[in-house]
Image (cartoon, rainbow, N blue to C red):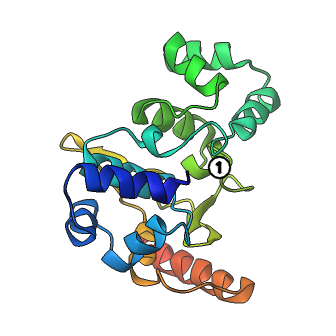
Amino acid sequence: MGVGERIKQFRKQKGLTQVKLAEKAGISRSYLADVESDRYNPSLTTLIDLAQALNVTASCFLDDKEIDFSNLIQLCKKNGMSLNSLGAILDISPKELDHIRSNKLPVEETMSKIADHFECTWDYLIGKTDSPDDIVLGGNSISIPDPISKHPQKVGGSVEPINIPSTIAAHFENMNFTKEETEEISNFIKFIASKRKK
């Protein structure tokens, strides 16, 4: 069973329509339909938004074949540390480290700590992208510039996506982008971010 099918299953168990779930998660109904049909591989941020809307954990949507923490292990090695020493530095519990070792999604706080420490995206940590600055946007990966958050932030007890790519995904959900188009989108995001610096 794929991610989309699991989301659909939880949605039906909760008695929600696609319209209602999309509204609660802050995404468009058509994008949710594409995700549920497994036409799009959603970003971890989107999965967390959907999980919160359904009152479940994001790991309910994923199995250990869909999460690969090898990028995280490589980051640790590159920085001369083990997963255990990273846990000690960031105050991550042994239980959460065991989740990572078994390719299960740890809690959002743990993901935030690790992403902040290595200055990378959540999607990179779980192996959805090949670059630390990339996120999943529809069926493509795009780079995000430094001034924009690479993972959701806690605001008032809930996770609020504050990165621009989440907003773009809501408006471009039915398109597959060419490499050139993806580069143009990335350049536009960088242009908007540069205006914020002023």
The C terminus: image quadrant: bottom left
> In this view of the protein, which residue sits in the foreground, 118 or 57?
57
Could you tell me which residue is drawn at 41 percent across and 32 percent down? Answer: 109
> In the rendered structure, which amino acid carries the disc numbered 1?
Tyr
- Looking at the image, is 22 positioned above or below residue 125? below
Element under label 1? helix
Check disc 1 and report the residue beneath it: 124
- In the drawing, does residue 54 fall left or right of residue 118? left
Q: Tell which of 6 and 137 is nearer to you.
A: 6
Which quadrant of the view contains residue 117? Answer: top right
Q: Is residue 86 visible?
A: yes
From the viewer's side, name the closer residue of 80 and 22.
Answer: 22
Residue at image position (73%, 40%) is 71
Dividing the picture into quadrants, the one containing residue 11 is bottom left
Residue at 81% over, 32% down: 78
Where's residue 36, x and y in %?
Answer: 44, 65
